Image: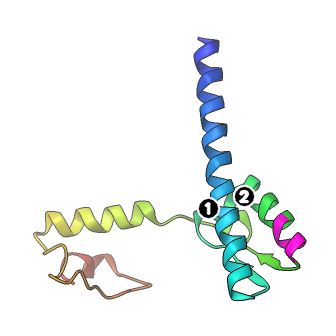
C-alpha cells in the first residue's frame, strides 16, 4: 500500500534527479567547450522545474544565460511522431530509405503523412 507508493515516488524522484544531473553536466560542458555564453532549452524537457533550477544555477556560476519558453509552451512531440509512424505503417508506406535519409517537415499535414 503506502510503502509501495513511497518506493515508487522515491524511484521516480531518483530517476528524475539522475536525468537532470546528466543533462545539466552535458549542457555546461558544451558551453565550456564552445565558449558560448547562451543556452536555449526547448521541447518537453524544458518544462521540468528541477532542470530549470539547476541549469539556472550552473549557467549563472559559469557566467552564461539560459533561456526557455514558458512551461506551457514546452511541448513534446513524441506522441505526434508515433502517430505519424502508425499512419504510415497502416498505409503501407516504406518506413525509411535505404540510407535512412528523410526530409524534415516542420508542418506535416495529416493528408500527406501516409503518402509522403
In what element is the residue under mark 2?
helix
Magenta span main SS: helix
Q: Quadrant of residue 90?
A: bottom left
Measuring 61% from the left and 21% from the top, which residue is drawn there?
5
Residue 92 horizontal/vertical position (percent): 10, 69
Q: Quadrant of residue 103?
A: bottom left
Report if the CB atoms under discs 1 and 2 are less than 8 Å apart. yes
Task: State the extent of the magenta-drawn residues as a range.
Answer: 58-62
Measuring 34% from the left and 61% from the top, which residue is drawn there?
82
Residue nearest the viewer, comparing 109 with 14: 14
Residue 70 drawn in magenta = no
> Within 10 angstroms of label 1, few (less than 14), some, or many (20 or more) residues?
some
Mark 1 lies on residue = 45
Measuring 77% from the left and 65% from the top, which residue is drawn there?
55
Residue located farthest toward the front when viewing the structure as drawn: 33
Image quadrant occupied by the C terminus: bottom left
Q: CA distance from mark 1 to mark 2?
A: 8 Å
Residue 93 horizontal/vertical position (percent): 13, 74
Left/right placement of residue 18 relative to residue 91 reads right
Mark 2 lies on residue = 51
Residue 59 drawn in magenta = yes
- Whichever of labels 1 and 2 marks the residue nearer the N terminus, that label is 1
Residue 49 horizontal/vertical position (percent): 75, 55
Amino acid at each position: 500500500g503506502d510503502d509501495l507508493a513511497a518506493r515508487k515516488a522515491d524511484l521516480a524522484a531518483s530517476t528524475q534527479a539522475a536525468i537532470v544531473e546528466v543533462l545539466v553536466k552535458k549542457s555546461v560542458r558544451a558551453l565550456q567547450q564552445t565558449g558560448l555564453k547562451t543556452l536555449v532549452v526547448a521541447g518537453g524537457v524544458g518544462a521540468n522545474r528541477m532542470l530549470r533550477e539547476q541549469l539556472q544555477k550552473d549557467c549563472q556560476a559559469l557566467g552564461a544565460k539560459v533561456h526557455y519558453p514558458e512551461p506551457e509552451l514546452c511541448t513534446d512531440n513524441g506522441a505526434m511522431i508515433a502517430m505519424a509512424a502508425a499512419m504510415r505503417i497502416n498505409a503501407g508506406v516504406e518506413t525509411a530509405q535505404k540510407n535512412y535519409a528523410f526530409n524534415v517537415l516542420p508542418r506535416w499535414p495529416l493528408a500527406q503523412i501516409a503518402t509522403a
